[in-house]
Image (cartoon, rainbow, N blue to C red):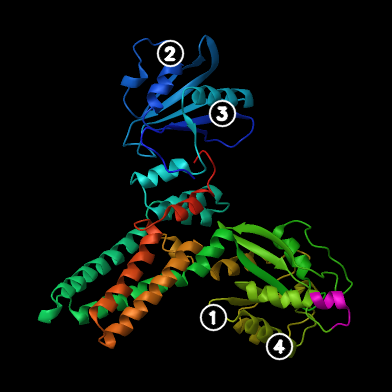
């Protein structure tokens, strides 16, 4: 990706490639308005684009010499009150592929440059319209496929936790400056930075960063879909349950044990939260080598899941077997924030209340008939309750793996600062670790960055954004 140059004006198609009712061509840079003005013709003689105020729309024709390319609506944004912070023109034309191609062609012939992927947002970042974490949220917003992912990206694009990070970083900057000042007066043995206050601040920073890092587990799965493994013995109705949840015949249903030999995945959205369901091979002892591989994959999928639905046949499964399966699933999950939900299936075959019904109720078992699609809504409600949506309210969930890694490195540096202060090591060594923490926090918001980081981030954007 090339670095934007002064005097460099870019153009790109901002709508999706292909034929549609309307296409939008976007220009940004110092020559955006004059270039559009040289091509634009309106019946209102008093309208001159180069003199028109920003945030105005104008109807007219785009001309290439004497040739009329299209009738368009042209929207004008003047610097710095635009998305990029530069002069911006957006031209809404008809969505013909020919018109789109000719629009770009006439712009390029007048010396404009085709934008690189994400270059409009890169310019917005460089011109101070947003920080780097907000810029990355733009790409997440474009890619959002559920309400939860949309809400999370939108809140982060509007600031999310970046303001919190900036506040934490300012505290560190102040202390670092004071400690570095001490180094200038090292022979006089003075302390400008109160060590007890610094220790308290470092402790608060470690706690705040730890909470943000912990939120990554939920933020990441909300963006990509919460993985839910459906496990149980063969023929307890796992595939039927998956079909009922998806409301389609996705998985093969058969009376023959071991029909499902590999994981089947699909995603549904429940009240804006995406759940990625995985129907796994039945858990049982078998001599079939292929089925054994399927069972091994099942255990692996349990480990990867955030939620496990332990399905059993309520009409035939003894309590001991249910306990054993619950223990197996809980043991494979490892982490406390992951959840096991018992699902007593085949209630339509139940002739009498099982003796262990009270124990099942205490374990918050959901009783369903997947075949008849009864109580599936109760299972959906239980899944929603298993999701901690608190961070969605203020955008404080970390969903970006780059941010997660940076928080981890900042936390390690702060741990060294904390240890050094307790051991009363020299100020210059404390300063080194403080600067390390500052660097990693700065890479999140873009206060510290490199062209390599920017290229990695913005190359994933579409060209018109």
Rendered residue at 28%/88% (across/down): 423
- Mark toward the start of the polypeptide (3 vs 2): 3
Labelled pair 4, 3 in contact (Cβ < 8 Å):
no
Rendered residue at 72%/57% (across/down): 247
Residue named by callout 1? 336
| Residue 459 is at least partly visible in this image | yes
Between 119 and 329, which is closer to the camera in this rendering? 119
Q: Comparing marks 4 and 2, which lies closer to the viewer? A: 2
Q: Give the alpha-carbon distance from disc 1 to disc 2, as whole Å.
A: 66 Å
Q: Relative to residue 84, is residue 378 drawn left or right?
A: right
Q: Secondary structure at mark 1?
A: loop
Between 173 and 201, which is closer to the camera in this rendering? 173
| Residue 394 is at least partly visible in this image | no
Residue named by callout 2? 42
Residue named by callout 3? 22
Q: Give the alpha-carbon distance from disc 4 to disc 3, as whole Å.
A: 60 Å
């Amino acid at each position: 990706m090339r670095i934007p140059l002064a005097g460099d004006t870019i153009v790109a198609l901002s709508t999706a490639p292909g034929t549609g009712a309307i296409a939008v061509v976007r220009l940004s840079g110092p020559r955006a308005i004059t270039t559009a003005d040289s091509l634009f013709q309106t019946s209102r003689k008093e309208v001159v684009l180069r003199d028109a105020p920003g945030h105005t729309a104008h109807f007219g024709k785009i001309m290439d010499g004497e040739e009329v390319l299209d009738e368009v609506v042209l929207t004008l944004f003047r610097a710095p009150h635009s998305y990029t912070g530069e002069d911006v023109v957006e031209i809404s034309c008809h969505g013909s592929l020919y018109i789109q191609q000719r629009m770009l062609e006439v712009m390029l012939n007048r010396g404009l440059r085709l934008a690189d992927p994400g270059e409009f947002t890169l310019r917005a970042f460089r011109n101070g319209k947003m920080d780097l974490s907000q810029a990355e949220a733009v790409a997440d917003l474009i890619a959002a496929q559920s309400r939860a992912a949309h809400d999370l990206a939108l809140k982060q694009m509007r600031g999310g936790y970046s303001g919190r990070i900036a506040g934490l970083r300012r505290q560190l900057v102040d202390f670092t400056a004071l400690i570095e000042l001490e180094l200038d007066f090292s022979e006089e043995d003075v302390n400008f930075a109160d060590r007890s206050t610094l220790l308290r601040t470092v402790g608060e920073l470690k706690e705040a960063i730890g909470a943000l890092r912990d939120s990554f587990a939920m933020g990441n799965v909300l963006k990509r879909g919460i993985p839910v493994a459906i496990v149980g013995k063969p023929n307890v109705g796992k595939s039927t349950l998956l079909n009922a949840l998806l409301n389609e015949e996705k998985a093969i249903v058969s009376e023959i044990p071991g029909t499902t030999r590999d994981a089947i995945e699909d995603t549904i959205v429940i009240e804006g939260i995406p759940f990625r369901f995985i129907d796994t091979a039945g858990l049982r002892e078998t001599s079939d080598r292929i089925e054994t591989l399927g069972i091994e994959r099942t255990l692996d999928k349990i480990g990867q899941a955030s939620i496990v639905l332990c399905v059993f046949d309520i009409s035939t499964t003894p309590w001991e077997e249910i306990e054993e399966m619950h223990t197996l699933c809980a043991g494979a999950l490892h982490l406390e924030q992951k959840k096991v939900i018992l699902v007593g299936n085949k209630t339509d075959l139940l002739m009498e209340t099982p003796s262990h019904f009270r124990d099942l109720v205490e374990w918050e078992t959901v009783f369903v008939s997947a075949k008849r699609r009864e109580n599936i809504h109760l299972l959906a409600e239980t899944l929603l309750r298993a999701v901690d949506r608190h961070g969605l309210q203020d955008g404080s969930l970390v969903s970006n793996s780059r941010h997660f890694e940076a928080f981890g490195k900042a936390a390690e540096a702060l741990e060294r600062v904390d240890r050094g202060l307790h051991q009363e090591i020299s100020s210059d060594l404390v300063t080194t670790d403080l600067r390390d923490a500052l660097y990693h926090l700065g890479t999140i918001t873009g206060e510290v960055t490199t062209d390599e980081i920017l290229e990695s981030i913005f190359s994933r954007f579409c060209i018109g954004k």
